[in-house]
Image (tube, grey):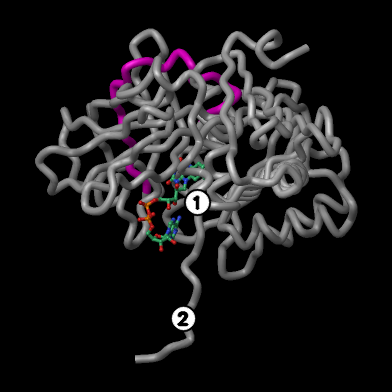
Amino acid sequence: MSIQEQFPFAAHTLLPNLSYPTLRNAIQHRAKEFDLPLAQDSKTEIQLKTAYGTYRFWQGDEAPIAEIGSSRSDWLYVLKESLQDIVHELSPEIAKAIHWSDAQESAGNRPPNFQFITIEDVTALAGGFLRVTALAEDLSHFTTDSIHFRLALPDPERQEPQWPYLSDSGQTIWPKGEAALHRPVYTVRDMDISTSRLTFDIFVHEGGRATAWAQNVTPGTRVGLTGPGGGGIPEVNQITMYADETGFPAVARILEALEPNASGHVVLQQTCSASAHYPMPTHPGVSIEYVQESDSDLGDLAIETMRNRPDQMIWLAAEKAAAQKLRAAFKTEGLNTKEHYIAAYWTRPAISNTQG
Ligand SMILES: Cc1cc2nc3c(=O)[nH]c(=O)nc-3n(C[C@H](O)[C@H](O)[C@H](O)COP(=O)(O)OP(=O)(O)OC[C@H]3O[C@@H](n4cnc5c(N)ncnc54)[C@H](O)[C@@H]3O)c2cc1C
């Protein structure tokens, strides 16, 4: 069955000057990296299945063709954006030449997963967090399957911020240079779809642009949001979670949503001593332990669980090094990460060797 027959939303584009073997190699690599199934993989066609829909690539008469299909228009857009990134890594020039078959319908519009939110309130929360409440335009796509989003923050000094739009070829044009938007990822801590009210918690850390924004923003300010995206609330009964402060809101959301008969353990790493006061919900079957960053490595702790507790779903959200260490251990042991969640929530800057 073709992609168009399978999905209500579909689009295709030529990928001129890209060889099919190079493309196939990139898709195989992607499938491996994210544990995604390849529905087909041959010298003439490759199909990749994702949570958002399906990609199909094949060698056309003039050039390889990419076709994507999804059950939702905003997911189709997410798939287009991911493909844009994959092709950009292979060749920025070829990525620029992407022209989606449905581009005319949407040219000039905002990207389908973009909306404005209006800030209602920012309050200090115990544990070194700021709680932001905002009114969104539409939260109906924010389900328990994807609980994260990106803010799109203009430079607060700019009088007239610029926002993204879709070009004649269906590509997203993001403001550049001084008009560029800062786009950090956050977790929906709470939401009410009927009133479109959204709450998220920002961990205050040194040098953070979103932190500085939240400390100074006034009610009524309008900023952008893209999403939802990322992981969701796991539907499991046995879970061991590891998180530093950036993952506390997601852990809180998961603890609230776990079934009453679920069991597990949560290890919360403190990079600052106050964060133990973050209002973390309790669950009767899940114990919570706090560890200090100075004497614990979340990657190592999670690896122990991987080795000794195969019954547990491992959920880890932390600095990139911990996530990479755990992923590498899964690979070394020949284990699949598909049933687990391993995510880098932030990246520590590389230490420079130059002095003075
Ligand atoms: C799926 C997902 C969900 C997330 N949910 C949340 C959430 O709900 N709440 C939350 O607070 N964060 C969350 N994060 C993490 C957040 O996106 C990052 O911390 C982001 O860098 C914050 O942007 P910023 O503008 O504050 O910092 P930036 O201006 O982007 O970075 C400035 C500097 O701060 C450093 N930095 C970033 N985070 C930290 C940190 N935690 N501690 C110390 N230094 C840091 C960076 O390395 C950089 O050097 C999430 C990330 C992901 C991927």
- Using the rendered image of the protein, determine whether residue 308 is visible from the camera's viewpoint: yes
At which x and y percent is residue 198? 37, 24
Compare residues 218 and 287 and report the one nearer the observer.
Answer: 218
**Furthest residue in direction front, as rendered:** 61
- Using the rendered image of the protein, determine whether residue 253 is visible from the camera's viewpoint: no
User: From the viewer's perspective, is residue 295 above or below residue 311?
Assistant: below
Residue 157 shown left or right of residue 5 in the figure: left
Amino acid bearing label 2: Ser
Q: How many marks?
A: 2
Amino acid bearing label 1: Pro
**Furthest residue in direction bottom, as rendered:** 356
- Nearer-N-terminus badge (2/1): 1
Q: Quadrant of the N terminus?
A: top right
Query: How far apart are the two marked residues, 2 and 1, measured between alpha carbons?
Result: 29 Å
Question: Would residue 138 be counted in the magenta stretch?
Answer: yes
Residue under circle 1? 92
At which x and y percent is residue 39? 82, 28
Where, by quadrant of the figure, is residue 151 drawn? top left
Mark 2 or 1: in front is: 1
Q: Looking at the image, which residue is at 68% across and 24% down? A: 54
Crowdedness of circle 2 by 10 Å Cα count: few (<14), some, many (20+)?
few
Where, by quadrant of the figure, is residue 4 drawn? top right
At which x and y percent is residue 220? 16, 28
Residue under circle 2? 352
Q: Looking at the image, which residue is at 90% across and 52% down? A: 334
User: From the viewer's perspective, is residue 224 above or below residue 337?
Assistant: above
The range drawn in magenta is 129-147
Q: Looking at the image, which residue is at 89% across and 56% down? A: 333
